[in-house]
Image (tube, grey):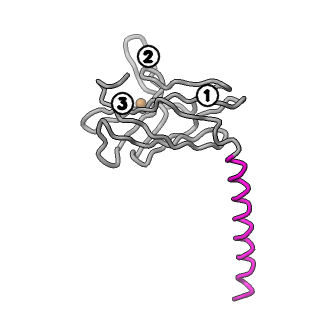
Amino acid sequence: MTIKLKPFASLAGALVLSFGVASAAHAADAHAISIKDAWVRWLPNNLPAAGYATLVNASDKPIDLVDVSSDDYGDAMLHQTVSNGSTQKMVMVDKLTVPAHGQVAITPGGYHLMLEDAKHKVAPGDTVHLTLKFSDGETLSAPFAVKAPGQAK
Ligand SMILES: [Cu+2]
């Protein structure tokens, strides 16, 4: 039993070591993307809400937003509103590219972060948290201010 435990102990040591290296490498480029003006347009009666923000890329490479999740909502995804003449519809989007040394404004009428199945009561004045995942491996969790449609800018 003692003999069998030894390989496990060294394996655990190796895992801790490699995790430490990965974290250090990640920390070096942790600030490539930043989020500003983050807010959620709340709708009554448990209707899906939409998150908006401006993503800023400080790096010299384009970085894609590839996934959205939230502890406050059962379902979060990247959508784009597409206009066909007089009608509008929403389509799922795989990614949203933030240009090198540039920014992308996610604003009403274009892209939005669709938020469905709120896990608890969410009301204007609240703050919810969204986690955005990027193609460079970066993950950002940011507070979004919940606003009523009338408060939306
Ligand atoms: Cu949508």
Quadrant where the image shows the C terminus: top left
* Residue at the disc numbered 3: 41
* Residue at the disc numbered 1: 98
Residue plotted at (33% across, 31% down): 147
Which secondary structure, mark 3? strand
Which secondary structure, mark 2? strand
Crowdedness near tag 1: few (<14), some (14–19) or many (≥20) residues, C-alpha within 10 Å: many
Quadrant hosting ligand 1: top left
Measuring from the top left, give residue 122's x and y in whole percent: 31, 42
Residue 19 badge: none
Gap between marks 3 and 2 measured at Cα: 20 Å
Of marks 1 and 2, the one in the foreground:
1
Report the amino acid beneath label 3.
Answer: Arg
Image position of 117 with respect to 82: above or below: below
Report the amino acid beneath label 2.
Answer: Ser
Outermost top residue: 85
Residue plotted at (57% across, 41% down): 133
| Bounds of the magenta segment | 1-27
Crowdedness near tag 3: few (<14), some (14–19) or many (≥20) residues, C-alpha within 10 Å: many
Q: Is mark 3 within 8 Å of ligand 1?
A: no
- Please name whichever residue, 67 or 144, is drawn nearer the observer in this view of the structure: 144
Measuring from the top left, give residue 42's x and y in whole percent: 32, 33
Outermost bottom residue: 1
Q: Earlier in the sequence, mark 1 or mark 2?
A: 2
Gap between marks 1 and 3 measured at Cα: 22 Å
* Residue at the disc numbered 2: 83
Image position of 119 with respect to 40: above or below: below
Q: Main secondary structure of the magenta part?
A: helix
